[in-house]
Amino acid sequence: MTESTELLYPAKWLLKASAGDRVTCELRMQIISGKIESGAIISENKLASDFAVSRSPVREALKILASENIIRPERMGAVVIGLTDKKIEEIYDVRILIETFVYERLVRINVNELIKELSKILEMMRISIKYQDADEFSYQDLIFHETIIRAIDHSYILMIWNNLKPVMESLILLSMRKRFKENYDDFTRIVINHELYIEAIKTKDRNLMIKALHQNFDDVQGKVEDMWKSQQMLSKGVEQEND
Amino acid sequence: MTESTELLYPAKWLLKASAGDRVTCELRMQIISGKIESGAIISENKLASDFAVSRSPVREALKILASENIIRPERMGAVVIGLTDKKIEEIYDVRILIETFVYERLVRINVNELIKELSKILEMMRISIKYQDADEFSYQDLIFHETIIRAIDHSYILMIWNNLKPVMESLILLSMRKRFKENYDDFTRIVINHELYIEAIKTKDRNLMIKALHQNFDDVQGKVEDMWKSQQMLSKGVEQEND
DNA sequence: TTAAGTATACTTGTATACAAGTATTATAAC
DNA sequence: GTTATAATACTTGTATACAAGTATACTTAA
């Protein structure tokens, strides 16, 4: 078995992280990128030796990935589920669901601080694009949406976001890295989309909000799916020649 | 410190469970019931000796309870957050959110099997009431709603439910036990509410669905809150007696 | 009495050891 | 060759040991 020592998850995001977190993030990336294929059976001992850590942090990682539904624990070993097209659509179902809920709350509160914060993040996104830093851009993109969600101070909506976030993060990382290489023009449009977001929140025009939201997701969803499929092909390309 | 050896979580639900699960469920009940008060600081070592297990299953429990937002890990020890009125309202926000989503899907699919399954569960609920088995009733109540959610085969909506479920379970257990003793008549109304649910799904009348849903939750929400507050008082009263 | 520094008793994170159970493989009987 | 049984090499769950870091308390100096 050929083992690539290259890490998929940004190393700088794990500087102060525990071994458990490192294994969790890296293993998640390997599963979602397709480096570890769906259906594969993984065991704690095997992973522990692969990552050169003990079973303790690996157990922690497997518990988390199981709660994210990308692995399924069985009698002996866990089965890798990974992501399907259907599941990616479902993720965006939930994002639209909670962001719609959030917007309904936002129109009833003062959003001045939020607008300022979002503008700042958008500036950061522009810089990330300028320097072609895909990982930083992904980070800011996620923070943008998280900031909106946090604004309504709703612990269980935030909980849903937190449960969704890691898988989203992996997906977006993989997608953005590819787009920076092959579809650099996409990012101009993404920035415009986010400007629309801010405008919709500022004007508190409900219809504009809904429109911006769906426009963003409908657009992004297709893109992310395409990119993800490409990524799947890419990673499988090495060993797969049929079709 | 006075320690009650009485378990809050139904022992029969943990017959084949691991020590980790046992600690998780019991600790969750102790926090939500108020037996362990909000603001209390808990440490792995202390809990391990309290539950007479090693730190391994305790660590597992704390990770889960932290993801449920009822404890907050800090530098040294974790702080008990527990549930506030606001958080209980938020739980029901999310329940309404996802069940509304689920209903929108249900009107587009065949619900014959679902109706049959729900009718069966409702029968079980009636038996539980007849024999005044609060724990069994709570279980069937949760299963009723979970069955509806599972019917649309949506992994991320189900994930939200699964994240919400344990805390819901604890809340409902505490609420139902109290109501069986003090508000036995409530259950007639609960059964009628669930009959309405089934009818709304069967007829696929969207307005009836929404109405049934809100009627059920608005009603239950107030009740659960009241009962929860009473439970808080109750458990604190007992503790004071023991001092 | 007060302030600073050190000793001690905690804490978590990780590695390792052990027990109990399960799947697989090898062996023996037919 | 086929089937039943035993040996084995795995698996997870739990306990324990150890390392590194942090808060607390005590001691000592001024």
Image: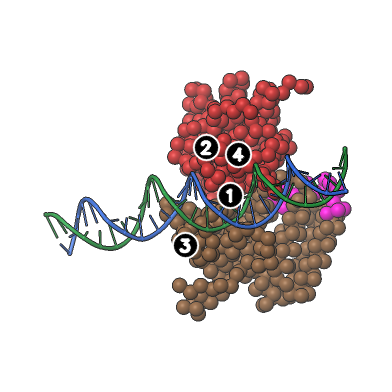
Chain colours: A red, B brown, C blue, D green
Question: What residue is drawn where x is 82% and y is 45%?
Answer: B108
User: Are tags 2 and 1 found on a single chain?
Assistant: yes
* Residue B128 x %, y %: 76, 70
- Whichever of callouts 4 and 1 sits on the residue coming sooner in the sequence is 4
What's the residue type where badge 3 is placed?
Answer: Lys
* Residue B5 x %, y %: 56, 72
Question: What residue is drawn where x is 48% and y is 58%?
Answer: B44
Q: Along the horizontal axis of the image, is B198 left or right of B219?
A: right
- How many other residues sit within 10 Å of disc 1, few (<14), some (14-19) or many (≥20)? some
| Residue bearing the label numbered 2 | A52
- Residue A14 in view in this figure: yes
* Residue B142 x %, y %: 71, 60
Q: Which of the two marks, 2 or 1, is nearer to us in this view?
A: 2
Q: Is residue A227 above or below residue A47?
A: above
Q: Secondary structure at mark 4?
A: helix
| Residue bearing the label numbered 1 | A159
Residue B138: within the magenta? no
Q: Is residue A55 above or below residue B119?
A: above
Q: Along the horizontal axis of the image, is D4 left or right of B241?
A: right
Q: What number is the disc on residue B46?
A: 3
- How many other residues sit within 10 Å of disc 4, few (<14), some (14-19) or many (≥20)? few
